[in-house]
Image (cartoon, rainbow, N blue to C red):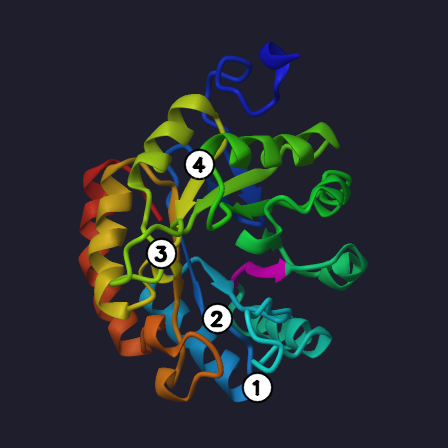
């Protein structure tokens, strides 16, 4: 029944706090997830992982299975990419986040700390139901043409299966605007926090599609109540095999962290 939906704040008035190893997402905790769009090779992921940790990132992201618009674009390293991401975790000690695309791939994610459901799979209901049977936190990205209500119901699919460790991700939606890759829906952060008790993080990299907007969009996300950010960083963006225009260099990420840390502290949250 509508009144019994597990994602509703009326059912669970307090903010949910989701544990990811020794980290927490939600409440007064703010997490910075950073790393490359795609894991390309050992040197790239290891260098980037060490750099983002040194600048204050609290988790590492990296795509091993990549949904691409063109079948000829780089599709990721698959199982080898997951292996390298797990090695990056051993080097840095930080939890890792990566995207699953298929039910059959779920066993490969045994050592991944947070499983991401990408925008293209937000309504892959069979995948969502299967993730509901896992015990891992799920980072659920809003589809590029989906409503907030549809995002909430996708979370419900996971929670109905018994997994209440769902984290929303607002990553921008497709509009008629062409100056940015997508349009970041800041109001979605506010509405999700009002309607649901689940944490909400923001992806400014995919929202903008250009690195010069990552900092201001992140600051906007912080003041509207987001619980974290997921930012793309590459050790050499100009050579990236995917999304090179929206990935920060390690130096740019260090400067970015210097700008957003005071704002996180100002609103009373801590990394």
Q: Nearer the viewer, mark 3 or mark 4?
A: 3
Q: Is residue 31 visible?
A: no
Q: Nearer the viewer, mark 1 or mark 3?
A: 3
Q: Is residue 268 above or below residue 106?
A: above
Residue beneath disc 2: 37
Q: Is residue 211 visible?
A: yes
Q: CA distance from mark 3 to mark 4?
A: 25 Å
Q: Is residue 208 left or right of residue 59?
A: left
Q: Residue at x 23, y 39 (%)?
A: 223
Residue beneath disc 4: 26
Residue beneath disc 1: 41
Secondary structure, mark 4, is: loop
Residue beneath disc 3: 182
The reply to whether dot 3 and dot 2 touch (C-beta < 8 Å) is: no
Secondary structure, mark 2, is: loop
Q: Which is more N-terminal, label 4 or label 3?
A: 4
The reply to whether dot 1 and dot 2 touch (C-beta < 8 Å) is: no
Secondary structure, mark 1, is: loop
Q: Is residue 130 above or below residue 152?
A: below
Q: CA distance from mark 4 to mark 1?
A: 33 Å
- Residue 41 counted in the magenta span: no
């Amino acid at each position: 029944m509508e009144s019994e939906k597990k994602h509703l704040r009326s059912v669970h008035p307090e903010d949910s706090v989701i544990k990811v190893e020794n980290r927490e997402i939600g409440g007064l905790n703010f997490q910075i997830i950073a790393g490359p769009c795609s894991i390309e090779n050992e040197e790239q992921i290891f260098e980037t992982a060490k750099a983002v940790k040194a600048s204050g990132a609290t988790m590492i992201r990296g795509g091993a299975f990549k949904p691409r618009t063109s079948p000829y674009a780089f599709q990721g390293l698959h199982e080898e990419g997951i292996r390298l991401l797990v090695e990056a975790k051993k080097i840095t000690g930080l939890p890792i986040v990566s995207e699953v695309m298929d039910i059959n791939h779920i066993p490969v994610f045994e050592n991944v700390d947070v499983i991401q459901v990408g925008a293209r799979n937000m309504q892959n209901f069979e995948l969502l139901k299967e993730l509901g049977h896992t015990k891992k936190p799920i980072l659920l990205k809003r589809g590029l043409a989906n409503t907030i209500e549809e995002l909430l119901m996708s979370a419900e699919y996971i929670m109905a299966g018994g997994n209440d460790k769902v984290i929303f991700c607002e990553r921008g939606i497709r509009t008629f605007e062409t100056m940015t890759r997508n349009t970041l829906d800041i109001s979605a952060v506010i509405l999700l926090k009002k309607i649901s008790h689940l944490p909400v993080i923001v992806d400014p990299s995919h929202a903008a599609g250009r690195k010069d907007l990552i900092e201001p969009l992140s600051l906007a996300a912080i003041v509207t109540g987001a619980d974290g950010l997921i930012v793309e960083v590459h050790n050499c963006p100009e050579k990236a095999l995917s999304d090179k225009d929206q990935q920060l260099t390690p130096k740019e990420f260090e400067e970015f962290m210097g700008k957003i840390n005071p704002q996180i502290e100002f609103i009373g949250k801590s990394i």
